[in-house]
């Protein structure tokens, strides 16, 4: 909005103090009219943005949050310890349907 108003000021200043031919003057006048027509548009946009920024972004919840289903992290710690324990070379990573081979038999 301030840019449109400043543009109009600059155009009027150039028309008064500058020496233009008729085409230059006409184009400056058209540009000034365009800037003037933009003033209400940008004014409405600024007002709408100010109204939107004045609203709170978060609303209060209907009921307080329930933290009961959350665990304390001990299960995650146990899983990390399980990942770090040494494994038998014949043990499958998932321990599903696998029996270790006797020491003398190689697959």
Image (spheres, rainbow, N blue to C red):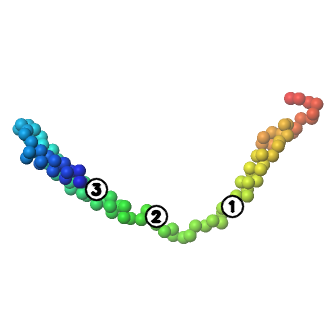
33 up-or-down from 100: above or below: below
**In the rendering, at what x and y percent does residue 100 appear?**
88, 38
Image quarter of the N terminus: bottom left
In the foreground, 23 or 20: 20
Residue at the disc numbered 3: 45
- The residue furthest left is 22
106 up-or-down from 99: above or below: above
Q: Do the residues labelled 3 and 2 touch (CB within 8 Å)?
A: no
Give the residue drawn at x 43%, y 62%. Answer: 57
Residue at the disc numbered 1: 71
Q: In this view, does 63 lie to the left or right of 71?
A: left
Q: Is residue 35 left or right of residue 104?
A: left
Disc on the earlier residue, 1 or 2: 2
Q: Quadrant of residue 40?
A: bottom left
**In the rendering, at what x and y percent does residue 5 appear?**
19, 53
Disc on the earlier residue, 3 or 2: 3
């Amino acid at each position: 909005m301030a840019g449109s108003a400043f543009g109009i000021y600059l155009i009027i200043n150039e028309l008064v103090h500058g020496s233009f031919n008729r085409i230059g003057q006409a184009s400056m006048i058209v540009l000034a009219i365009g800037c003037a027509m933009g003033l209400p548009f940008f004014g409405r946009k600024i007002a709408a943005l100010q109204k939107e920024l004045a609203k709170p972004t978060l609303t209060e919840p209907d009921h307080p949050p329930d933290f009961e289903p959350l665990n304390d992290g001990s299960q995650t710690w146990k899983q990390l310890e399980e990942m770090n324990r040494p494994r038998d070379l014949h043990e499958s990573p998932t321990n599903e349907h696998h029996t270790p081979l006797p020491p003398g038999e190689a697959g």
